[in-house]
Image: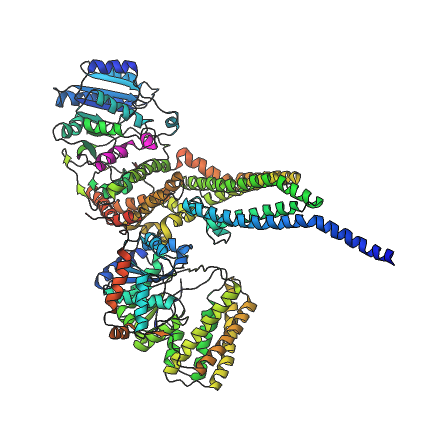
């Protein structure tokens, strides 16, 4: 196992601290506006709920230019040990921004894991630095299941707008659930708690030079925890409100990053997921409450136009991946007027399975393959928005549950074709 | 999309509007709980190396309502057999492969021969017949569908539409034949267009009203290789092992069931076989043999209905057919013109000439020996002669299918 | 009388002598041909076997070579096709070697030229194969990217790029083969330049409205969707 070379001053800091019970990692990149709030919330949480534990906050910065690190330094209360470090970022990750907006989030996490290992931490937490809705309770909710409940991995549970997180809702959650049999609702949430044992296990995996470390670290952490039989729980954190994302973030590259990471993990853990059928709930902590639904502005007509455009232009590619029967079905969808547009759940499920199989069989270059899914995904999203338009949050969630069942029903198809 | 005209004595189910495959399959899944469906696939090993089979397997892997798939593998070695098993493994329905050249199945054929059954030469007819036998032997399916393995444009919609009328519990159909137009940049399906239809109409003109001829003429594509039937029909029907397979099967259906319970269904918007390229000489020979077999099959059926064939009748037939066929060419020329398709009138006329010769040859053979029957006996008769044949067949196939490696299944939680 | 006989016999003798000198060459050629054909057959067999062993057919399905063949109405297996190409290449080489064994001046020249040309032919073939794969890859990448950004004429754009690249590759191959290099260069410049200019004019003149619309849209005429995909 090769370790990241931490700078010598960091080594000194670690040597001075020597031991910690809780390590909180905050990877950041140009988050000066929000990170102060995040750090304060973390400190308050630690002071309020874990006063007797030794805790360390690690801010791993990807080379911010807006003074993020200064903000962290200023916000730090005296009695906390705060480790500030720049993590090394590969030249390539400067260009390839991962979907969560932090370059080199993977190597940031790796340093956090390493510090946790050095300090022999019992529990670790990582939180995004752009979360506005973080409260001190988040720390409690992510740490307690580990410290007290004996869980190794705590995924977040949020209340989000019914139209938010559509990639999670229509691909990542249903597929992860059907594959590994655990109902982890937010596999790529961004805020996680995990045990020291888990951190050590992550360090044994040699993925740090791959795409996984660059963009897919969230799904990788969740999948690795589930697939290796660690005890997994989820905690209800309330609402998730980010700082506004970069509006230029391209949907198809976002899709490419998450979905390729997911498919890649399917290769790694094929022997694990093959025999699993059905799914079981994961213990959940925290108090669940509903949040209000404000109106969201979406233009489904334009989305459907994109879908139809894809149908016209990508027909050869889709026909090759989906086969004649399902391609005909997609064609039929394209001929429907907007008002009647309804993407059948079973068809969507088979499409995702077909893409996974095409990925496995290396039918075409990965970027081409997954990016060609974009118009289909847009069509599916438009259909979901149409269906859930007049539903409350529970109704929309029930719709997603139906999709998950459909994924579980198609597991046989996926397993038998994965040769 | 087609018209909605009902013609002839059987029911025609058209492709109207844009029905969803999703709905068809959901309904079929329901039907299959009551009457399980088997799919019989007569295949040559060479087809697995062609372009069609990967597509067919990709599609069949998504079909959930099939109870079993019985693939009869012809012209394949033991190694090929294993390869085919591997090839078929993505399909989740139970797949049984009958290895026609395996030692166990050869022994089964020996058994037939020992007991005085002539099951004919290898070919699609014999393969299909054996597949029915195996489905009957297992007794786990009520409906059998069958299609060729060389369809390049295969979509599982074809299978769904084919199975639907017979599997539907409230539609009382026992036999359903697939039809489709075979159009590329020109009109294909020459044997149907220029031989069967004109011949049947010429015979109608000479003999007059005849049930079988009306029945045969009702089929839009009498020679299509796709059909679906109830298993009882597989039990009582005799199948020709020669090229007369399609027409001969229809004759048997006509004999055993009322046309009211027979239907044909539009199965695919476009359909393309990709045959291995045959040498011109071979193709001509094959086509000739096929044409002669088809004609003989029609003559024989009519004779068994009591129609008297004489020298004179055959002489008139040749002339009447020629007239009918020429008229047909003119019709299709117009049809091709309005649709902007290529149409080689000379080639069509040459085909008609060849078909006329074939009819002549067929009538000669028929006059010499009207009793030559290429029909494989039906399974009922086989069972009464060899009561344990089903048991033997089942054992042979099951042994073949489980001897070596376990067929990539996964343990289900 | 004997003079006259000599007159007739002498040329015959001469021909016979020449033939006697030539005969071993002819035999050598025949031997070379037979050996060459046998060797070519063996090589083809070994090639097909080893290609099968490394699943060449599968690979060819994936990179689109099979599709390319099918488009050209070639329905044989890729391994068989490649085997046949190599086989015939070897046969031609054998023929050339065989002919050179005849030791005839004119033929020698021809053979020399042929062997001098071989490397060029080979590199041209490599350019064609790599080029067509590359052109397919690039045009598909453009197609997908254009579709995903909602561009209406994605297919047209991708096809245009593919055509341009194909022209470029063909010109490169022809240049490599030294088929009328001057004309190829000129023709290429004209065609390539022509296509680019035509496209520029077409997009420029025909696309004013579209461009205006696009700019208007960029300026926020249309509201962005507010959903978060992750």
Does A216 appear in magenta? yes
Of A379 and B29, nearer the camera is B29
- B358 lies left or right of B68: right
Q: Quadrant of residue B67?
A: bottom left
How many numbered marks have been drawn onto this rendered protein structure? 0
What residue appears at the point 19 percent right and 32 percent down from the top-left corner? A154
Q: Quadrant of residue B95?
A: bottom left
Q: Residue furthest front?
A: C2
Question: Does residue C195 appear in the picture of this structure?
Answer: no
- B273 lies left or right of A232: right
User: What kind of secondary structure does the magenta stretch mostly adopt?
Assistant: helix
Residue C100, relative to residue B148: is it above or below? above
Residue A214, relative to residue B209: is it above or below? above
- Give, as a single range, the part of the protein colored magenta: A211-233
Across and down, in percent, residue A194 comes to 20, 29
Across and down, in percent, residue B401 comes to 28, 57
Across and down, in percent, residue C27 comes to 64, 50
Q: Quadrant of the N terminus of chain A?
A: top left
Residue B340, relative to residue B289: is it above or below? above
What residue appears at the point 40 percent right and 72 percent down from the top-left corner? B244
Does A406 appear in magenta? no
Colour treatment of the image = rainbow
Question: Does residue B404 appear in the picture of this structure?
Answer: yes
- B334 lies left or right of B52: right
Residue B114, relative to residue A14: is it above or below? below
Of A362 and A323, nearer the camera is A362
Across and down, in percent, residue C1 comes to 88, 59
């Amino acid at each position: 196992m090769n370790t990241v070379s931490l700078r010598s001053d960091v080594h000194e800091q670690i040597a001075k601290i020597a031991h910690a019970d809780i390590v909180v990692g905050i990877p950041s990149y140009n988050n000066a506006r929000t990170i102060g709030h995040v750090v304060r919330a973390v400190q308050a949480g630690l002071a309020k709920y874990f006063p007797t534990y030794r805790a360390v906050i690690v801010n791993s910065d990807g080379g911010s230019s807006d003074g993020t690190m200064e903000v962290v330094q200023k916000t730090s209360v005296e009695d906390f040990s705060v480790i500030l470090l720049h993590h090394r970022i590969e030249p390539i990750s400067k260009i390839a921004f991962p979907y969560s907006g932090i370059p080199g989030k993977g190597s940031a996490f790796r340093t956090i894991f390493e510090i946790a290992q050095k300090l022999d931490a019992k529990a670790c937490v990582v939180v995004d630095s752009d979360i506005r809705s973080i409260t001190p309770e988040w720390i409690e909710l992510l740490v307690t299941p580990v410290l007290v409940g004996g869980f190794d991995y705590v995924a977040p549970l949020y209340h989000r707008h019914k139209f938010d997180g559509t990639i999670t809702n229509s691909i990542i959650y249903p597929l992860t659930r059907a594959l590994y049999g655990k109902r982890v609702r937010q596999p790529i949430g961004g805020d996680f708690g995990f045990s020291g044992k888990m951190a050590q296990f992550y360090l044994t995996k040699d993925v740090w030079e791959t795409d996984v470390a660059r963009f897919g670290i969230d799904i990788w952490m969740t999948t690795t925890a589930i697939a290796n039989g660690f005890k997994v729980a989820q905690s209800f954190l309330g609402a998730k409100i980010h700082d506004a994302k970069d509006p230029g973030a391209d949907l198809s590259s976002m899709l490419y990053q998450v979905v390729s990471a997911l498919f890649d993990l399917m290769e790694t853990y094929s022997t694990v997921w093959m025999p699993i059928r059905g799914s079981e709930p994961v213990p959940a902590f925290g108090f669940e409450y509903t949040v209000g639904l404000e109106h969201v502005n979406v233009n489904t007509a334009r989305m459907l136009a994109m879908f139809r455009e894809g149908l016209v232009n990508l027909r050869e590619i889709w026909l090759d991946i989906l086969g004649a029967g399902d391609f005909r079905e997609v064609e039929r969808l394209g001929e429907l007027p907007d008002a009647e547009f309804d993407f059948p759940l079973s068809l969507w499920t088979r499409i995702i399975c077909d893409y996974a199989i095409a990925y496995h069989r290396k039918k075409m270059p990965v970027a081409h393959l997954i990016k060609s899914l974009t118009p289909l995904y847009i069509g599916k999203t438009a259909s979901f928005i149409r269906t859930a338009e007049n539903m409350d949050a529970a109704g929309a969630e029930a719709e997603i549950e139906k999709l998950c069942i459909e994924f579980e029903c198609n597991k046989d198809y996926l397993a038998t074709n994965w040769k | 999309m087609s018209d909605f005209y009902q013609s002839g004595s059987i029911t025609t189910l058209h492709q109207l509007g844009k029905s969803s495959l999703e709905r068809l399959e959901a309904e079929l899944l329901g039907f299959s709980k009551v009457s399980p469906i088997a799919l019989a696939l007569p295949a040559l090993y060479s087809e697995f190396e062609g372009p069609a089979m990967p597509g067919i397997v990709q599609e069949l892997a998504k079909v959930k309502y099939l109870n079993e798939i019985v693939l009869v593998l012809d012209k394949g070695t033991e190694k090929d057999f294993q390869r085919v098993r591997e090839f078929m493994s993505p399909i989740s329905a139970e797949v049984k492969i009958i290895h026609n050249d395996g030692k166990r199945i050869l022994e089964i054929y020996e058994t037939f021969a020992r007991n005085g059954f002539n099951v004919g030469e290898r070919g699609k007819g014999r393969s299909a017949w054996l597949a029915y036998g195996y489905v009957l032997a297992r007794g786990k399916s009520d409906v059998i569908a069958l299609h060729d393995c060389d369809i390049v444009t295969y979509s599982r919609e074809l299978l769904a539409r084919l199975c639907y009328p017979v599997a539907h519990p409230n539609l009382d159909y026992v036999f359903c034949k697939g039809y489709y137009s075979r159009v590329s940049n020109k009109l294909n399906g020459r044997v149907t267009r220029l031989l069967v239809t004109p011949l049947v109409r010429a015979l109608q003109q000479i003999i007059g009203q005849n049930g079988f001829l009306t029945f045969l003429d009702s089929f839009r594509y009498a020679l299509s290789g796709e059909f679906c039937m109830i298993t009882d029909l597989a039990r009582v029907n005799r199948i020709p092992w020669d090229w007369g397979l399609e027409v001969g099967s229809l004759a048997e259906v006509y004999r055993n069931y009322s046309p009211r319970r027979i239907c044909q269904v539009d199965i695919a918007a476009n359909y393309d076989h990709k045959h291995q390229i045959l040498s011109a000489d071979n193709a001509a020979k094959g086509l000739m043999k096929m044409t002669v077999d088809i004609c003989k099959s029609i003559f024989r059926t009519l004779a068994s209905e009591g129609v008297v064939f004489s020298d004179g009748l055959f002489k008139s037939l040749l002339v009447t057919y020629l007239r009918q066929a020429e008229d047909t060419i003119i019709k299709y020329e117009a049809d091709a013109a309005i649709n902007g398709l290529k149409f080689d009138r000379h080639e069509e006329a040459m085909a008609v000439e060849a078909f006329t010769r074939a009819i002549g040859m067929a009538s000669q053979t028929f006059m010499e020996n009207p009793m030559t029957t290429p029909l494989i006996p039906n399974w009922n008769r086989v069972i009464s002669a060899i009561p344990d044949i089903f048991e033997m067949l089942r054992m042979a196939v099951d042994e073949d299918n489980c001897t070596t490696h376990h067929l990539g299944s996964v343990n289900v939680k | 009388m004997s003079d006259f006989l000599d007159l007739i016999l002498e040329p015959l003798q001469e021909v016979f002598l020449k033939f006697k000198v030539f005969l071993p060459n002819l035999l050598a050629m025949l031997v070379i041909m037979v050996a060459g054909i046998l060797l070519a057959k063996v090589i083809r067999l070994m090639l097909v076997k080893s290609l099968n062993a490394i699943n060449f057919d599968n690979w060819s399905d994936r990179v689109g070579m099979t599709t390319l063949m099918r488009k050209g109405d070639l329905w044989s297996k890729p391994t068989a096709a490649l085997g046949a190409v190599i086989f015939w290449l070897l046969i031609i080489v054998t023929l050339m070697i065989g002919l050179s064994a005849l030791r005839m001046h004119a033929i020698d020249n021809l053979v020399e030229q042929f062997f001098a040309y071989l490397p060029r032919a080979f590199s041209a073939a490599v350019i064609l194969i790599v080029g067509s794969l590359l052109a397919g890859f690039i045009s598909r990448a453009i197609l997908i990217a254009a579709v995903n950004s909602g561009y209406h004429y994605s297919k047209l754009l991708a096809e245009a790029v593919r055509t341009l690249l194909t022209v470029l590759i063909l010109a490169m191959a022809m240049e490599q083969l030294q088929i009328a290099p001057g004309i190829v260069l000129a023709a290429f410049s004209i065609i390539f330049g022509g296509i680019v200019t035509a496209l520029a004019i077409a997009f420029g003149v025909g696309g004013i409205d579209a461009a205006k619309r696009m700019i208007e849209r960029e300026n926020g005429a249309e509201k962005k969707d507010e959903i978060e995909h992750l």
